[in-house]
Amino acid sequence: MPTRASLGWPADIVRADDWPNWLPLTANGVVPLGPHSSVPALREALRTAMDRRTFFTISGATLSALAADWAAGPTSELAQARDGKPIGEDFVAFLENTTQQLASHATEQRQHTATLVDAHLSTVTELLEHGRYAPALGLRLHTLAASLSQTVAWHRFDLGRHTHASQNWIAGLHNAHAAGDHDMGAGLLGDLAYQAAWRRDHTTAANILNYALTRAQNPAARCLLQLRLARTLAAQGDRSERRVVLRALAAAEKHLGDAGADRPAWCAWVSEAVMRSVNLPQRRGVSQLIYVAAA
């Protein structure tokens, strides 16, 4: 058994009676993408919720490598649970509907909804791991897990619990990957990039966004990703990046023009008003674009 001393971790995060729950599942904190990685990634996110593990951070290089794997790899084959109790479609529909209602509440209501969202995610994780379901229902469960993970991640981000947020975005990425939803996967990578930019790691943010753009398909999704790319490139303060920033803004404007009413929920708010507020490089200078796509 490795000791906390051999791992270089402080004594106050370890309880002898809790071995091995205080250990991450992987050396770098990220479960690799694979055909059976969706549930382990959810379990890692749930384990990370224990406060004593907030010391563990995920490096920018590790996040960039995860994004590269997602961009290069095919969709994971859906794993079908063959034992356990059967899952009814009505119950999954109930979880889908209540999840949508919980996510639609205003930000100030999150103090009241966070526990319910967490419980929904734990329930879906149990269903994926132990339930019996046909591939079509499994697809819905993975999609629901991705959506719930994204909501939980933003709750954690708003509370400043960044390790928790990262693990939930990563868990969502695994499940979007399993469901074959490239736009949702790109959106989750975009959230990880936003977090990296917020922490002033703009190199990681740009790397992740470029990988996300390789598979994003919906024009509204591509618009938001390009806006965030412009923001993080401009924030680097390198005048040589001016042309790249303007190119990203032009691409965002074109994608917005191509976007119809059918948009993923995570980028449904992108509008002409957003573009008008940021597409001012000639008059205000690229250095002022650091506020681009702040949401």
Image (cartoon, rainbow, N blue to C red):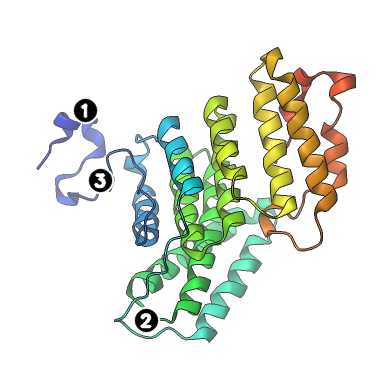
Rate crowding at label 2 as few (under 14), some (14 to 19) or many (20 or more) other CA atoms within 10 Å. Answer: some
Q: In this figure, which residue is indicated by the disc labeled 3?
A: 22
Tell me which residue sits at (59%, 38%) in the image: 209
The secondary structure type at the circle numbered 1 is loop
Q: What is the distance, in whole Å, between disc 1 and disc 2 at their CAs? A: 42 Å
**Quarter occupied by the C terminus:** top right
Q: Residue at x 39, y 34 (%)?
A: 57
The label nearer to you, 1 versus 2, is: 2
* Helix, strand or loop for disc 3: loop
Relative to 99, 80 lies left or right: left
Residue at the (65%, 28%) spot, across then down: 232
Check disc 2 and give the amino acid type: Arg
The residue nearer to you, when weighing 192 against 222, is 222
User: Where does residue 179 sit, x and y in percent of width and height?
Assistant: 50, 65
Q: Which mark is residue 132?
A: 2
Instruction: Give the spatial CA distance, label 3 vs label 1.
Output: 14 Å
Q: Earlier in the sequence, mark 3 or mark 1?
A: 1
In this view, 276 is above or below 281: below
Q: Which residue is mark 1?
A: 8
